[in-house]
């Protein structure tokens, strides 16, 4: 990256860091069961809930406990269950039509990050009915208060229940972009381990690695605070203590609960301290090839950490100590490599590959351009890279020529 662009990026990031204490960040209210929601909905004087979820969640019947609780309390609801893995503008439009058709007055995202992102985007369209999602792309363009927004994560990974971001894919161009503004932070987050018990092992693993990526990128970035560092370290500790257990024994409710809280802490960390090039590259892969976000993050994470080099060794040592992989006496370079190696070992255990077969060489410049545009100048990464430099990550992920 040339010196002028570097200066621009670092100046922008410094300005954002200095503004942190004055920005209206907030954490959602946490409740431990979906059965607590009817009382909350009544207290907020709402009467008809739009539940936004996906076909897999609907097929598993995971919303049944919530539906029963709402019916028993006399609260009406409508379900939109067609959210796809990388939610599109079409998903948002279809769900928004249901919101108006059934006179809904609050929104609940039930599922992984895709359902919660779709719910946030629907809320944004309700708040600003005359503006398209594309016009809200970027930061601080929503402004208006959303209807009551609640989130029930069924995966312990995205942290979307804590964040101010919604990531949407344009249904026509397949371009994936983020909308970032404080009104998108859900008012209520339900960390109910019972809704995660049916999660298959591979999804459990990739979403857990997604949470790990959030915590790591937030911690190694240049816009951390004491609170975000504490949250990131707690998330890393909980993930390394529990992810193998939930992978092997999905019915372990304590480990499931711990992973939900790890995802929450990681979400709290990155919603203030941001992420980095792992996410920027992963978003481009999700937009172009529909690669699930958690899987893309898991594949990329060790490659990006290695590329940052010695700049992040001391921070990776902190994470290695939190994960009980190294001691305070371990040399930073050694601890950093232990941490990266542990991530690779988890990938192998969970059968997470090192390649993305869908990548075509001719697509790489376009994908790298998308990643560059997303990350720079917003993400306070340890080492700045331009689009040309980011191309190396896509090249690493290509299948070897036969």
Image (cartoon, helix red, strand yellow):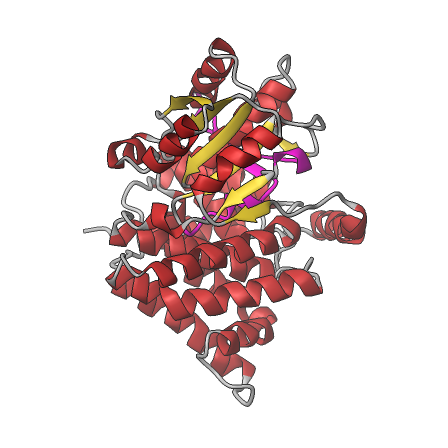
Say which of 389 and 278 sits in front. 278
Front residue of this view, candidates 58 and 338 = 58
Question: Magenta segment, which residues?
Answer: 156-184
Seen in the picture, residue 165 relative to 127 is either above or below; the reply is below
Q: Is residue 385 left or right of residue 193?
A: right
Is residue 42 toward the left or the right of residue 260 in the image? Answer: right
Residue for point 64% across, 21% down: 127
> Quick one: 215 or 314, which is closer to the camera?
215
Q: Name the residue furthest left.
A: 402
In the displayed structure, does residue 232 sit left or right of residue 139?
Answer: left
Identify which residue is drawn at 43% across, 22% down: 77
Where residue 302 appears, as percent x and y from the top left, is 42, 63
Is 20 colored magenta in this rendering?
no
Q: Judge whether residue 170 is colored magenta.
A: yes
Residue at 49%, 66% (x, y): give it: 236
Residue 6 position within the rendered picture, expressed as x and y whole percent measured from the top left: 70, 52
Q: Position of residue 52 (x, y in %)?
A: 43, 28
Q: Residue furthest bottom?
A: 329
- Residue 181 seen in this snapshot: yes
Q: Residue furthest top?
A: 101
Compared with residue 314, is residue 142 higher up or lower down, i.e. above or below? Answer: above
Against 372, is 237 above or below?
A: below
């Amino acid at each position: 990256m040339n010196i002028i662009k570097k200066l621009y990026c670092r100046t922008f990031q410094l300005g954002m860091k200095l503004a942190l204490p004055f920005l209206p960040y907030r954490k959602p209210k946490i409740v431990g069961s979906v059965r607590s929601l009817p009382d909350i909905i009544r207290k907020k004087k709402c009467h008809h809930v739009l539940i936004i979820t996906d076909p897999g969640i609907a097929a598993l019947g995971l919303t049944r406990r919530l539906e029963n609780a709402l019916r028993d309390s006399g609260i009406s609801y409508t379900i939109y269950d067609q959210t796809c893995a990388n939610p599109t503008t079409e998903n948002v439009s279809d769900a928004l039509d249901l919101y108006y058709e059934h006179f809904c007055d609050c929104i609940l995202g039930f599922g992984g990050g895709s359902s919660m992102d779709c719910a946030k985007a629907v809320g944004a369209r309700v708040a600003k009915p005359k503006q398209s999602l594309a016009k809200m792309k970027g930061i601080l363009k929503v402004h208006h208060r959303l209807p009551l927004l609640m989130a029930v994560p069924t995966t312990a990974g995205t942290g979307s229940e804590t964040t101010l971001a919604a990531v949407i894919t344009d249904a026509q161009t397949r371009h994936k972009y983020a909308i970032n503004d404080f009104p998108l932070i859900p008012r209520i987050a339900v960390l109910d381990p019972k809704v995660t018990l049916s999660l298959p092992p591979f999804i459990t693993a990739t979403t857990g690695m997604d949470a790990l990526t959030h915590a790591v990128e937030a911690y190694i970035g240049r816009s951390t605070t004491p609170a975000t560092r504490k949250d990131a370290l707690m998330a890393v500790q909980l993930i390394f203590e529990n992810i193998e257990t939930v992978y092997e024994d999905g019915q372990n409710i304590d480990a499931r609960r711990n992973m939900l809280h790890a995802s929450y802490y990681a979400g709290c960390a990155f919603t203030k301290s941001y992420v980095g090039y792992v996410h920027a590259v992963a978003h481009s892969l999700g937009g172009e090839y529909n690669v699930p976000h958690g899987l893309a993050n898991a594949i990329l994470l060790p490659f990006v950490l290695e590329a940052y080099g010695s700049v992040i060794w001391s921070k990776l040592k902190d994470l290695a100590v939190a994960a009980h992989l190294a001691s305070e006496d371990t040399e930073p370079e050694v601890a950093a490599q232990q941490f990266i190696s542990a991530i690779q070992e988890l990938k192998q255990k969970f059968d997470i590959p090192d390649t993305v077969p869908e990548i075509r060489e001719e697509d790489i410049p376009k994908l790298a351009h998308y990643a560059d545009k997303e990350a720079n100048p917003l993400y306070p990464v340890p080492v700045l890279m331009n689009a040309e430099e980011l191309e190396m990550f896509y090249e690493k992920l290509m299948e070897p020529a036969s």
